[in-house]
Amino acid sequence: MKQEQLKDLLADMTLEEKIDQLLQVCSYYYEKEGVITGPENAAGFTEQEINNAGSVLGGGGAKLLRKIQESYMKKQPHQIPLIFMADIINGYRTIFPIPLAQGCTFNTEIVEKAAAVSAKESAAAGLHLTFSPMVDLVRDARWGRVMESTGEDAYLNSCFAKAIVEGYQGTGPLTEKGKIAACVKHFAGYGAPMAGRDYNTVELSERTLLGDYLPAYQAAVDAGCATVMTSFNTLDRIPSTGNKKLLRDILRNKMGFDGVIISDWAAIEELIHHGIAKNKEEAAALAMEAGVDIDMMTTCYCGNLKKLVEENKINESLVDEAALRVLELKNQLGLFENPFKDGDEAEELEVILCDEHKKLAKEISIESMVLLKNDHILPLKKEGQKLAFVGPHVDNKWISGVWSIFAKVDENVTFKKGIENLGISDVTYAKGCGFVDPNSGLDVYEEMLSPEEEKAIEDQLLEEALKNAKEADVVVMALGELPIHSGEASSRTNLDLPEVQMNLFRKVSEVNSNIVVVLFNGRPLTIKEISDKSRAVLEAWLPGSEGGNAIAEILFGDATPSGKLSMSFPHNVGQVPIYYNEFHTGRPYAGNEGNGKYFSKYLDVPNEPLYPFGYGLSYTNFEISEVILDQRELTKEGSVEASVTVKNTGEYSGKEVIQLYIQDKNASVARPVRELKGFQKIELEPGEEIKVTFVITEEMLKFYDVNMNYTSEPGEFNVFIGSDSGTKNQGGFILV
């Protein structure tokens, strides 16, 4: 449909019909098969509002969505189709590792492929849009939704934001088969809630917001994301959903976004709870003035906008503007010509969880896993080594991540199944303990038992585990979180493993010191004791459909680990929020000041994290030469080439992530100790070497100066190139 036709259609619609296009309701209201992804409140929709709503969320499956669309279109007076949206965060039915783990790949190409597979499966299942990617910068592991981000670094997040949007949408028209629209979220600053508590207030300076938190959203906008979702939090003490400066001045005018803005679940109504709206009518007016186009799951718009227009409290042009954007999105997807787009039951059967998709899922799972420690014990031997696999996650199928709402967990390859698939013999398996402490208040995927029954089973599980551990050459312990322990509304003040798992770990370590720990989790945990007492630690995250196969291949050397942490692991929760690119203080502590007290430091733990951003081991060794710069001066129009030679000096082929960091030594405002500005993932055979070169330009040195101008300043810069954020391999140049 041409633009003029869309405008003619809009002109032919009544005010009520335009307002209804701005309403999004859950598929639950059409078919009970839909998935509720937010609190099921008494929304109070009328039958007419549901029949004329512009979009639907939460349902999936070609048969279901075709049925809903056909029924809807029969009643729609202008034959305007519904748009179907859902949370496809890390896969539809082929489930990839959680986004935080995907960030650990440092491989935008493979993550873009994963997003493309998610789009292909979702499109075949009748969906048109995913509420992804979440590009919020995350630095506090207490916040459960860190699992949805690609990490703590603005540059890395920006690279992945672009890759994921282009994976979902492609770079051509959205009508292309197998493509769906992306919804970038949550705008803005949602990843920095105070105290790590979900939905909480966010306090960011303007410079921090613009310089650190907005770049990833900008990258998504530049990649052509079709929609943006508002965040729940306040920013500058104004809730994002009612923040005109944020949505109109910054997002639309400054950042150049011209697509649809959608609220998060019931976020417009939450303006009342924030205390800036007295009632739904005021909330609707504030959100409409701010520029929110779609009201997700409240009656604020459909119940109040007509009255607000008739009483001249808002201009009808605002409703027209929002309704036209919704129509334009439907048109971009080709829904006026084909309301079902790519939804097809036969296609669904063919593409969902096909061999090609599972192969990619295993590949990305392998690349996302981070070897945190290896004291000459991995890889394990396939023969001649008696192995005991112990822990509640050994045969746990819940490894998809909490947002994998269309996953079928029975299709996931468990850790145990992965070992069996390799044909490993002389092994034992024991659960050892439950997932969580009794009476912890955390929901678990287990039958509720009486205290007496629980104690008897606990004793039996522990006895079996210790027997197996005593008789083994090596004990591999599978420990960690369940999916429900991270994600939305899963904030925690304690980042330790449950005490029941730590008790198992301590007792096993008393009978066998050859322990390899495999961690399943959706956030960085505090694992100091585990790190100290284990000979190896493999961070597997929540790895998805092929997780078990990926872990088995890494443990037994069929694959070499190459993941690098996208988020720092603290010594303890008292360090968070913690991140590598912090700032110098007036009393910086470098660690060599002895017992001097009056420095910026802790008394009980180091300032540095237990494991820093960018860190990860391999089974082979990489030698990185000193930094070579082709010149020592950089002009605004020129460039400096910084290079190193990397050689695989070990016995295994492997991948390494070479990371470029830059430090601005003096500026008009305080600058980070270093910032990631580039990375390259290379693969080398034993004995092979390669030159890795980064091109540094003046654009990479820009920041918001003392007058809030986005610019660079002449002066000295240090260049660091190495295998993690702590590298001391450096050179320097001057910007003239």
Image (tube, grey):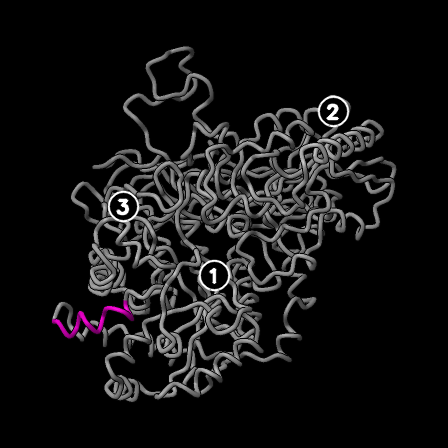
Binning the other alpha carbons within 10 Å of mark 1 as few (below 14), some (14 to 19) or many (20 upward) gives many
Is residue 678 left or right of 235 when viewed as pictured?
Answer: right
* Residue at (43% x, 66% y) in the render: 182
- Residue 224 counted in the magenta span: no
Is the residue marked by circle 3 packed among few (<14), some (14-19), or many (20+) residues within 10 Å? many
Please state which amino acid type lies under the numbered disc 1. Answer: Ile
Q: Which residue is mark 1?
A: 164
Q: Earlier in the sequence, mark 1 or mark 2?
A: 1
| Callout 2 crowding tier (Cα within 10 Å): few <14, some 14–19, many ≥20 | some
Label 2 sits on a secondary structure element that is loop
Circle 2 sits on which residue? 513
When the figure is inspected, residue 719 is found, relative to residue 220, above or below; the finding is above
**Stretch of the chain drawn in magenta:** 301-311
In the rendered structure, which amino acid carries the disc numbered 3? Phe
In the rendered picture of this protein, how many numbered marks are placed on residues? 3
Query: Residue flagged by tag 2: what amino acid is it?
Result: Ser
Measured Cα–Cα span from mark 3 to mark 2:
50 Å
- Image quadrant for the N terminus? bottom left
Image side of residue 289 versus residue 22, left or right: left
Residue at image point 64% right, 50% down: 398
Whether 306 is among the magenta residues is yes
Quarter of the figure with the C terminus = top left
Q: Residue at x 33, y 76 (%)?
A: 21
Q: Earlier in the sequence, mark 3 or mark 2?
A: 2
Q: Would you say residue 222 is visible in this rendering? A: no
Q: Secondary structure at mark 3?
A: strand
